[in-house]
Amino acid sequence: MSDGVKHINSAQEFANLLNTTQYVVADFYADWCGPCKAIAPMYAQFAKTFSIPNFLAFAKINVDSVQQVAQHYRVSAMPTFLFFKNGKQVAVNGSVMIQGADVNSLRAAAEKMGRLAKEKAAAAGSS
Amino acid sequence: MSALKAGDSFPEGVTFTYVAPSGDTDLTVCGLPIQYDASKEFANKKVVLVAVPGAFTPTCQQQHVPSYLAKLEEFKSKGVDQIIFIASNDAWVMAAWGKANGVKDESILFMSDADCKFSKTIGWTQGDRTKRYAIVIDHGKVTYAELDEVPKSIANTGADGVLAKL
């Protein structure tokens, strides 16, 4: 059983998510951005397939509504996908960010994060 | 408002907005304008700042930008870290203008002096557009600041004119 996408409405919400979830994927998007709309269904699908409460979450951050967070991470193009481990930004599959509606890279990153989160969750469950 | 001239310090608090170049991913990416803190960036760089009345307008498009594109290496050899084109057009128009000129990287940045905010402080505007001018800032100090007021002329602000003074 997994959650869907986590919609972030404030900097505090994002901070909370980073504090409580080991791995986080963040989708920075805008309502008026065509490519963002195009990739949204796939992102939602990855969220459904790979999310694990406390171990992997897929967040969506509207750059117009939560400007502070978008500016903090210097988001300059949408969609931009960032990756976090234990609250710190990390690279996945060699990329520190995916810029643009690149489904293949996003799928590979989601699968990788999913695998890592599953291992961590399993390890935590057996201790 | 006071015009800038060689020897002046570049003013504090000057910012522009621009959409960072994102390489070839034009079709699958939407640009988001970010603020460029010019005063802060110019403090430790050698920059050529060129203002044009309008993106895509005839002289600017046919002569001004091409003159710089042709001389990028020469500017680099004279120690110029960044060439920035500004106009009163918004950041998206400026970004599109850059792409239309085939600029995919940061060799020339295209930024918006929205509402001619900066150009007004130095009195170099015409109506709601900027005048055609070029300013060279070397680590915070203005070393060149000239206008081209003759229509269609880029004698002072085109690549050759500016290179001659570097």
Image (spheres, rainbow, N blue to C red):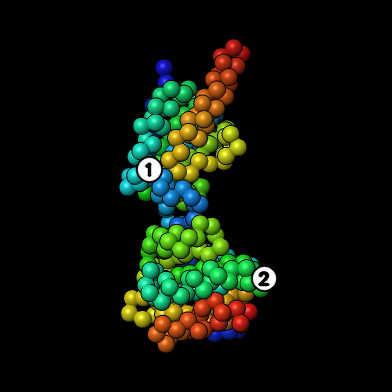
Depicted A34 relative to depicted B166: above or below = above
Name the residue rendered at 61%, 71% in the picture. B75
Q: Do marks 2 and 1 both belong to one polypeptide chain?
A: no
Q: Nearer the viewer, residue B101 or B10?
A: B101
Name the residue rendered at 45%, 43% in the picture. A100
Q: Nearer the viewer, residue A31 or B56?
A: B56
Q: Nearer the viewer, residue A48 or A109?
A: A109
Name the residue rendered at 63%, 79% in the picture. B166
Amino acid type assigned to the residue bearing label 1 in the image: Pro
Depicted A93 relative to depicted B100: above or below = above
Q: Chain of mark 1?
A: A
- Give the residue pinned by disc 1: A35
Q: Secondary structure at mark 1?
A: helix
Depicted B116 relative to depicted B18: above or below = below
Residue A76 in view, yes or no: yes
Residue B77: numbered disc: 2
Quadrant where the image shows the N terminus of chain A: top left
Q: Residues within 10 Å of mark 1 (few under 14, many from 20)?
A: some
Q: Secondary structure at mark 2?
A: helix
Percent position of residue A6, x then y: 40, 32
Q: Chain of mark 2?
A: B
**Residue A11 found in image quarter:** top left
Name the residue rendered at 50%, 60% in the picture. B103
